[in-house]
Image (cartoon, rainbow, N blue to C red):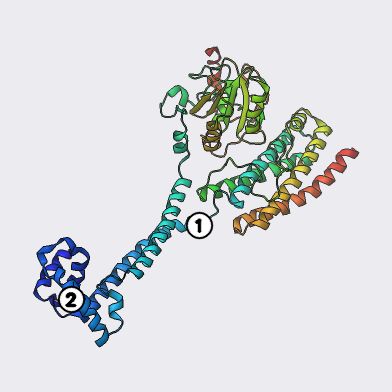
Amino acid sequence: MIRDLTTPDADSASGVTPTADRQRFGYAALALLLVGIVLGAAIGLVIPQFRTPGDDSVEAGFFRDMSTHHAQAVEMSMIAHAGSATPSIVTLSADIATTQQAQIGYMQAWLRDWDLSPTSDNTAMAWMPDSAGSVVNGLMPGMANPEQLASLRKATGKDLDIQFLELMRAHHLGGIHMAQEAEELSDNKDVDWLANSMVAAQQGEIQLIDDLLKQARSS
Amino acid sequence: MSTPGPERVPSTVKVGKTTGQGKPPTGKPGQNRPAGKGQAGKGGKGRKPVTPVKVSGGRNWGPIAVAGAVVLVAVGIIGYGVYASVQGSRDWTEKMADIQGVVDYRAQKNPQIDDRTHKDGALTYVTSPPVGGAHNGTWQNCMGDVYSAPIANEHAVHSLEHGAVWITYKQGLAADQVATLQDKVEGKDYMLLSPYAGLDKNVSVQAWGYQLKTDDVNDGRIDDFIAAARVKASMEPGAGCSSGNTTTGPVTAAQNNGATMPSAAPSNAAAVPSAGS
């Protein structure tokens, strides 16, 4: 294009300032438009990264940690489901195991959707302010320790029921605390929706657990 | 392109100015430059005061510098955004490939390592510790479990298939070094730790199809390995780590107790147990 234009230049290069300015303006505008299109396309490519939570976000931290937290609830519920002879415990444990495993699926799918790893090397609870000290031996609030789990695996009958209910009660309290914090800290509607449903469901289950504990202890 | 010839002429003046420095053939642009300046100045007085500012042939460096700086900053920001997003979405296998000393057994396409069938009884493995292959129908519990005695390969390999990272250490490793490894495992699902008899290094870390061996429990590559492979190395996305075997020691004959997968082929099992150690 430049070469096309240089030829006529020699013929009539003198005294054409007004049109020259207009032409220059036209080309400048065209160049600006092109630059604008390129910048716009680049920004468009990048912007999803700014609109979804990042690797160090509250949302990602909550989903990763709650996945691990939930996984232990599933573990304890499966032990109780397999070992308890009390119909209400068998039902409750099935409810907790299936619900929380499905919620793990939600959380892992969202992390994947956000192009984030399902795990990270961050310390547990790092997303939550003032959480230092709440993690003991790698265990988040409410989580049972290896000795408690070993004891639960060995327990039978009424002993199993009571141990399961007590461990799950503490587990729910820790989980509710985390979910409430996430709901407060995050503006992401998916996070808020899921965290809110966890709080509501687990608070309801704690009432049920308290009733079942009373029955188990008095039987 | 559609503009008539004469109208295009002026733009050549501009072209001449920006690119014509080393192009004497046209002759005119070079001579025109000082004249152009003069014209622009005169034109500004006589006609449009605005136009000379816009394109004034004599380079008006101020606005150019500002515009250039703005463009540079914009390009920098966007460039970083692109870089960050590309880095962030890098595949976990690429991160594994970046860790020095990690052996990628998936790349070898060894049918014995890639074998994912369920078999009862004692099985033999190509590597020590194993990184894949046929395994017991019951996985080893890998909810951040810390085992103080060796566990059965046949169960542990099933845990690797579920996405667990299995850290093994030389039997008899000093307690404080074991404690360092324990810190990496406790409280984390898809992790398990156990001593391993006859290990050639102090520590060996396994995911399905990957292995890293080191003598230093503080080797940062162990953490890199865990960060890259945990859960992501799963051959069965969504498969869990609980409801597994929680005992130590060798696999018991025809052990297939827990919540195992019905797809395991129990009919084949009877033929296999003689596979030896």
Labels 2 and 1 share a subunit: no
Is residue B262 something one can see in this rendering?
Answer: no
Front residue (pair A122, B274): A122
Residue B200 circle label: none
User: Mark 1: which secondary structure?
Assistant: helix
Q: CA distance from mark 2 to mark 1?
A: 51 Å
- Kind of residue indicated by mark 2: Ala
Compared with A2, B120 (above or below) is: above
Direction right: furthest residue: A218
| Amino acid at circle 1 | Phe
- Chain letter of mark 2 equals B
The residue at the point 41 percent across, 61 percent down is B74
- Relative to residue A121, is residue B48 depicted above or below? below
Is residue A88 something one can see in this rendering?
yes
Count of numbered badges drawn on the protein: 2
Are the two marked residues, 2 and 1, in contact with CB atoms closer than 8 angstroms?
Answer: no
* Residue drawn 29% across the image and 67% down it: A31
Badge 1: how crowded within 10 Å, few (<14), some, or many (20+)?
Answer: few
SS at circle 2: helix
Which residue in the structure is indicated by mark 2? B35
Residue B37 horizontal/vertical position (percent) = 22, 76
Q: Is residue A128 left or right of residue B214?
A: right
* Residue at mark 1: A50
Using the image, determine if residue A108 lies above or below residue B181: below
Q: Residue at x 22, y 65 (%)?
A: B18
